[in-house]
Structure formats: structure tokens, C-alpha cells
Image (spheres, coloured by chain):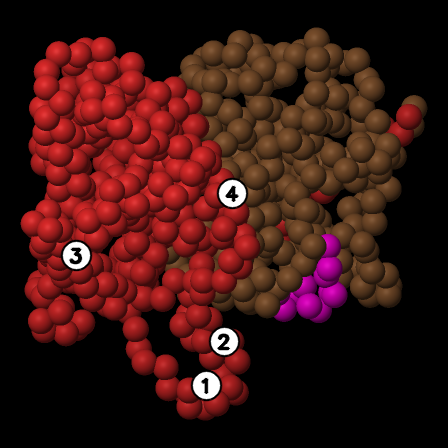
Chain colours: A red, B brown
């Protein structure tokens, strides 16, 4: 009974803190702009099954991708065990899901196997970060805190896996010493039982109980650290993939507000009819966090700063300041800064800072070649180029600010219908004196 | 063998005669004005004649699709261009468009529909490959068989529109020695010209993107760098010049390679 009470209090605190955090984040979403309507559920489920659960894009880097896939699939299995722990903790049952029979055995056995596999993968990840120089973990946006954040999360996961294994070992040892039936299958933990042969049965029970509590309380703590960490990814990545932009990467979203204005200009007769719709004037493009779409913000919360985008960015590879990862990190950081101020003072609140310039410089934005390598590479379908173009849209249409050569391009297109200063009269010169050999 | 003059059909002329071609061949600004790329357009026009395709160009009525403006953030200018182009297409009852420039292809295929311009848009590589598959275009000449070729994927065909196979299928008909660069298909590195970088100096960095990509191509030791985009061609040709390789290694468009092998 005491166990149940302590557990319930711990769970309540966890849920309480978690709801508070999520509620805050949801309130920030209210400031963002619309993206696309979420439909085509069949397509979305397919994308989610292949990209999220099938981990297809993480395998673009096959070796380290394989270890990530192990961790992901391990989480999927182990979470079922954690669910049982919550039921047991709340209701005082012992292995509440055992009625599932053979399915239960499969779940527990895979959890046991994955605990070791995930632990191995995490040790590899940690050593890569601590002892090797991996270029994509560096960059102007990667501050010390990013590295600490990564190492804390990895350490917690490692502890979770170790406690899961010691829990299983303690359980098997105790049960076999007491001659009681062992529920579930433990192919990996069984191998380790030899290490702890001596000792009274009670000490194994203690080992089991201590590990049980360590494991579940760590999960509770972890769940509440995540929303403040880059590892929020653990919660956000699968939904983010489900909410992927389904358009071809080459397609930029249309700006309906501009279409209305252009149609007015081209056909003034409709001016009065169009004016009647009375659309509220909105800033063109993205200057600050609240100008971004909910999907941009979702992307930024899902980003775990793996740097695959930046490692394939042609601008970044050749030493330019642009880093697609930084664009996502900056949006998240700016919303974290401005979100609470907008909650307090309204969406129009101006703190004399903005995502543009205080976080992301024009130099970064103009370095993008829109090659879409970043978006193609992102294992969870984050789309950086649309946000970069939206920020260029703000610069050009609200501030008339662009590199001089591009202003010349705009002039040429307006005056001669080509980015270069040539006359439309010359458009057929290529076809002059064209001859073909007929065989 | 006889030499025959090609009169490139112009939409307005055909229309005046009450004729309607099957395809609009969209030449693009680079095709019209870039001296090097004009040769690519000429090669493709020869192939169209060779295949007896019913097509026409807009000629003096062609204008910019608005793509450079759009990628540079000038949505207003883009939409003005696009709505003008859509009007012209409406006037000539255009249904099918062939493009050679991947940027024009992308914007017609993916972005014009949002403004009401819906067409069957086909890139020349898809068009050529389809003609090969249908047996209309026969590439059995041995002239390029032993020439080593590497193909540079333009971003706006590859990642933007998932066109990776057609260029390779065509090139494999032409050469027995197609060598892939280390970064290819969806992993291909941009030439550095996309997103209107073509028209401006690059931002400060420690290297030009086109040099990085030219080095990828040089590593394959191929004698021909095949491209399929006017901007990629400018960048990689510049890269070859920079590396003093323009004598040994040629940068040719796939249309030129086909015209060459057919001795058109």
C-alpha cells in the first residue's frame, strides 16, 4: 500500500509538471501562423511507418544510423514494459500484463534483449561525443550547453537500460532462489545471473526493488527534462514525421495574400470586390518567431541537433555562416524567449528583438542555394528551406532589402522579362541558321 | 546524308495558321540568352526535329517564369510573372509543356498549379527516356561507347522532384562507362547556383561551392561531365576552367551527348 501511495504521488507530480510544460508550449503554438491543412491520413501513416518506425532516413548514414534504429526500436518495446510498471505501481498488481501469455513473453524478452543493445548503442554514442571529434557535432550554434544536454540525456538513457537489466537479474535470481515461477522470458539477464550467485534471496529482492524504483523514477524525471532539452525529440519526432509536409521538396508554399494583391494590380476592375473581403493586413514573410508557421515551430521542437542537415549543406561545407540546424535552434530559442512575453502581453508585443538579425543574420539567409539537401537528409522530415525563403520574403517585401545583384535581377525581370539585361526581341537568336543532318 | 534547315516553329505563327502543336517547348532565359547554353537548346531542337515532335516555342513572347524572383523572396514579382505566363498559356491553349531547365520545370510542375496554371509538365530527360523506351529514339551509335562520363544531378530534378533514373538510363545507352561521383542522386552536392546564387557573389566562406563540386567530378576521372541544367553547366564549366581542366575534360549537356551520338 505504501508503495502504491508513494508511486501515485510521484506519478501525479510527473503528470502535473509535464502538463504545465506542455500547456506552455501549446500556448506558444497559438501565436504561430497556419501552414498546410493536415489531410491525406493514409499518406501520412505511410510516411510515419517508413520514416519514423522504419527509420529509413536515419539509414542514410548506415552505420551510426543502425545504432540509432536499435535505440528507437528498443524504446518502442521497452515502453510497453514501462506501461506495466505504471499499472503495477498504481494498483499494486504484480506484472499486470502477464495474462497476455506468449505475447507477454515476447514483449519482455525483446525488452530484455533491447536493454542491452540500447545500452551498447548509448555507450558508442557517448564515446563518440566524449573521445572523438565528430565534425557535425561542432559549429557556431553548438554551445557548451548543447553538448552537456546531449551527454545528460545519453547518461540517463544508459542508466535506464542498466536499471532495467539489474531489475530483471534481481528478479530472476530471487525467484529461482525461492523456487518460485519466473514470469516472462529474460534471454539476456539470464546470462548475467551467474555473476551474482552468492548472497541471500532478500538481497536480490532488494536489488530488484531498488532497480524498479530507479528505473521508473528516472523515466518520470526524464519525461520532465525532455521538453526543456534537445531530446524533446523523443516525444516530438514521430508526430513531426506524421505531420510532414507532403509536397515535393521543390515546391514552395504559395502566399495567398500576395495573390490577392497581384490580381488587384493586374485587374483593377475587381478592386472593389476584393477590398470587401477585408483581409487583415499581415506581415509578409517571417521576421520573428510568431510569423513562422506552426509546422516550423513543430520542426524546431523536434530537432535534436544531430547536424545531418548542416553536414550536407553546400554553403556550410564551404565555410559559409549558414547552418540549417542553427535556423531550427534559433527559432526554438526565440520562441522560448518571446513566447512567455506574448502570453503576458499579447501577440503584438514588441521587445525590440527579433528572430531576424538578433538570431539569424541576413548573411546566413542569402547563403542558401535552396538545394534541399538539408530537408532530404533530416531523419524526421524537418523542412528548413521554406523557413529560409519565408525570411527572405520578409526582407525583400517588407524592407526592400536584398543583395545589390539580386535587386538588379528583380529589375531585369520586371523590365525585360529575364534575370539578365537582354531584350525579349533576342529570344529566338539561338534558333538562327539551325541545321540538321538527315541520315 | 543531307543537311536540312530547321525552322523552329513559333506558337504565334502556328496559331495564325490555325495549327495547334502538341507541346510547348519552354526554352527558358538561359536557353535564350546564355551563349553556351544556346548550344544545348539547339541540340535539343535538333532531337525534336529528328523525332518529328509536334511542338512550338513562344519566342519573343516568352518571359521569365518568376523563379529567380521567388527563390530570392520576391513573391510579388514572381506572382506577377506567373500570372502573365499563365495568361499567355491560356491564349495558346497550352496543355503540355517540355522544359530543359529544371528550375522552369519545377515551378511549372509544382508551383503554377497554386495560381491556377495546371499543365502536363515534362522535363526533357523524361521525354527523351520515354522516346527511348517506346523505341522512337534509338541510341545505338558506338561513338561515345568508350568515353567515361559522370553525371551531376541538378537539385531541382533530383531532390526537388525525384528524377534520378532517367538521366542515368539515357547515359547508359550512350556510354558503357558511367561513373558515379561519391555524392550522387539524393546525396548529390549542389553546384552552388540554386536559390538565385547564380546571379550574385557567394557569401564569405573558405571555398566556392562549384569548386567543391568540380572536385567531386574530377575524382571520378571521367572525361565528360554530363549536366542537365543551365546553371549547373555554368558552374561546372567555371570549375573546370579554375582547375585548368577545360582542355581535357568536357562539360556537356545530355541533349548534346545525344545529338552528338546521333550525328545530327
Occupied quadrant, residue B128: top right
Q: What's drawn in magenta, residue-wise?
A: B86-96
Q: Position of residue B137 (x, y in %)?
A: 83, 31
User: What residue sits right under mark 3 in the picture?
Assistant: A15
Q: Position of residue B32 (x, y in %)?
A: 61, 45
Q: CA distance from mark 3 to mark 1?
A: 50 Å
Q: Is residue B70 above or below residue B133?
A: below
**In the image, residue A336 lies in the stretch drawn in magenta:** no
**In the image, residue B90 lies in the stretch drawn in magenta:** yes
Q: What residue is shown at x 61% (from left), y 64% (from top)?
A: B117
Residue B143 shown left or right of residue A211 in the figure: right
Q: In the depicted view, which residue is nearer to us: A360 or B226?
A: A360
Label 1 with label 2: CB-CB less than 8 Å: yes
- Pointer 3 and pointer 1 on the same chain: yes
Q: Secondary structure at mark 2?
A: helix
N-terminal of the two: label 1 or label 2? Answer: 2
Q: Secondary structure at mark 1?
A: helix
Which mark, by number, is residue A274? 1
N-terminal of the two: label 2 or label 3? Answer: 3
Residue B77 shown left or right of residue B247 in the figure: left
Which mark, by number, is residue B32? none
- Please state which of the two labelled residues, at mark 4 or mark 1, is closer to the viewer: 4
- Number of other residues with Cα within 10 Å of mark 4, as a class: few under 14, some 14 to 19, many 20 or more: many
Q: What residue is shown at x 60% (from left), y 37% (from top)?
A: B163
User: What residue sits right under mark 2 in the picture?
Assistant: A263
N-terminal of the two: label 3 or label 1? Answer: 3
Q: Which quadrant is home to the C terminus of chain A?
A: top right
- Number of other residues with Cα within 10 Å of mark 3, as a class: few under 14, some 14 to 19, many 20 or more: some
Q: Specify the subunit that label 4 lies on.
A: B
Q: Specify the subunit that label 2 lies on.
A: A
Amino acid at each position: 500500500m505504501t508503495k502504491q501511495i508513494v508511486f501515485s504521488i510521484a506519478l501525479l507530480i510527473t503528470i502535473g509538471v509535464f502538463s504545465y510544460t506542455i500547456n506552455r508550449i501549446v500556448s506558444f503554438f497559438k501565436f504561430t501562423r497556419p501552414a498546410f491543412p493536415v489531410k491525406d491520413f493514409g499518406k501520412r501513416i505511410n510516411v510515419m511507418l517508413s520514416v519514423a518506425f522504419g527509420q529509413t532516413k536515419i539509414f542514410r548514414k548506415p552505420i551510426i544510423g543502425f545504432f540509432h534504429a536499435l535505440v528507437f526500436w528498443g524504446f518502442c518495446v521497452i515502453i510497453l514494459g514501462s506501461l506495466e510498471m505504471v499499472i503495477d505501481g498504481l494498483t499494486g498488481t504484480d506484472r499486470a500484463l502477464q495474462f497476455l501469455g506468449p505475447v507477454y513473453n515476447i514483449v519482455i524478452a525483446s525488452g530484455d534483449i533491447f536493454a542491452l543493445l540500447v545500452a551498447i548503442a548509448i555507450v558508442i554514442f557517448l564515446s563518440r561525443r566524449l573521445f572523438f571529434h565528430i565534425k557535425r557535432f561542432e559549429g557556431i550554434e553548438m554551445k557548451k550547453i548543447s553538448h552537456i544536454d546531449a551527454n545528460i540525456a545519453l547518461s540517463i538513457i544508459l542508466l535506464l537500460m542498466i536499471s532495467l537489466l539489474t531489475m530483471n537479474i534481481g528478479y530472476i535470481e530471487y525467484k529461482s532462489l525461492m523456487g518460485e515461477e519466473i514470469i516472462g522470458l529474460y534471454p539476456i539477464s539470464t546470462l548475467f545471473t551467474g555473476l551474482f550467485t552468492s548472497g541471500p534471496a532478500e538481497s536480490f529482492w532488494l536489488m530488484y526493488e531498488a532497480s524498479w524504483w530507479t528505473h521508473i523514477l528516472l523515466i518520470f524525471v526524464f519525461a520532465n527534462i525532455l521538453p526543456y532539452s534537445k531530446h524533446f525529440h523523443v516525444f516530438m519526432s514521430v508526430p513531426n514525421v506524421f505531420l510532414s509536409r507532403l509536397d515535393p521538396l521543390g515546391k514552395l508554399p504559395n502566399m495567398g495574400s500576395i495573390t490577392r494583391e497581384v490580381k488587384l494590380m493586374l485587374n483593377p476592375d475587381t478592386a472593389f470586390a476584393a477590398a470587401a473581403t477585408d483581409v487583415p493586413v499581415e506581415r509578409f514573410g517571417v521576421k520573428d518567431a510568431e510569423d513562422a508557421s506552426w509546422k516550423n515551430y513543430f520542426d524546431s521542437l523536434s530537432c535534436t541537433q544531430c547536424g545531418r542537415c548542416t553536414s550536407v549543406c553546400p554553403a556550410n561545407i564551404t565555410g559559409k555562416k549558414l547552418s540549417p540546424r542553427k535556423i531550427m535552434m534559433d527559432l526554438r530559442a526565440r520562441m522560448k524567449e518571446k513566447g512567455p512575453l506574448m502570453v503576458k502581453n499579447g501577440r503584438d508585443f514588441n521587445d525590440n528583438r527579433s528572430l531576424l538579425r538578433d538570431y539569424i543574420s541576413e548573411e546566413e539567409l542569402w547563403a542558401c542555394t535552396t538545394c534541399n539537401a538539408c530537408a532530404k537528409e533530416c531523419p524526421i522530415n524537418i523542412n528548413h528551406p521554406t523557413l529560409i525563403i519565408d525570411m527572405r520574403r520578409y526582407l525583400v517585401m517588407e524592407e526592400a532589402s536584398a543583395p545589390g545583384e539580386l535587386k538588379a535581377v528583380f529589375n531585369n525581370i520586371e523590365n525585360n522579362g529575364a534575370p539578365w539585361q537582354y531584350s525579349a526581341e533576342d529570344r529566338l537568336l539561338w534558333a538562327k541558321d539551325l541545321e540538321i543532318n538527315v541520315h | 546524308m543531307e543537311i536540312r534547315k530547321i525552322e523552329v516553329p513559333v506558337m504565334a505563327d502556328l496559331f495564325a495558321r490555325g495549327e495547334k502543336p502538341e507541346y510547348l517547348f519552354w526554352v527558358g532565359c538561359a536557353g535564350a540568352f546564355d551563349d553556351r547554353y544556346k548550344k544545348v537548346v539547339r541540340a535539343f531542337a535538333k532531337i525534336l526535329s529528328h523525332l518529328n515532335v509536334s511542338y512550338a516555342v513562344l519566342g519573343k513572347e516568352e518571359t521569365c517564369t518568376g523563379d529567380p524572383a521567388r527563390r530570392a523572396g520576391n513573391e510579388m514579382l514572381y506572382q506577377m510573372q506567373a500570372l502573365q505566363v499563365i495568361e499567355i498559356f491560356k491564349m495558346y491553349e497550352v496543355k503540355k509543356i517540355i522544359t530543359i531547365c529544371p528550375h522552369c520545370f519545377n515551378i511549372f510542375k509544382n508551383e503554377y498549379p497554386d495560381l491556377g496554371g495546371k499543365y502536363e509538365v515534362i522535363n526533357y530527360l523524361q521525354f527523351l527516356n520515354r522516346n527511348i523506351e517506346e523505341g522512337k529514339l534509338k541510341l545505338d551509335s558506338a561513338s561515345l561507347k568508350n568515353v567515361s562520363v559522370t553525371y551531376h544531378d541538378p537539385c531541382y530534378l533530383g531532390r526537388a522532384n525525384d528524377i534520378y533514373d532517367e538521366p542515368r538510363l539515357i547515359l547508359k545507352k550512350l556510354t558503357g562507362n558511367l561513373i558515379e561521383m561519391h555524392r550522387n542522386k539524393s546525396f548529390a552536392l549542389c553546384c552552388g547556383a540554386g536559390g538565385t546564387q547564380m546571379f550574385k557573389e557567394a557569401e564569405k566562406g573558405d571555398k566556392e561551392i562549384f569548386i567543391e563540386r568540380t572536385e567531386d567530378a574530377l575524382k571520378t576521372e571521367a572525361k565528360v561531365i554530363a549536366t542537365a541544367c543551365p546553371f549547373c553547366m555554368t558552374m561546372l564549366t567555371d570549375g573546370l576552367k579554375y582547375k585548368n581542366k577545360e582542355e581535357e575534360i568536357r562539360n556537356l549537356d545530355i541533349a548534346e551527348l545525344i545529338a552528338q551520338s546521333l550525328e545530327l
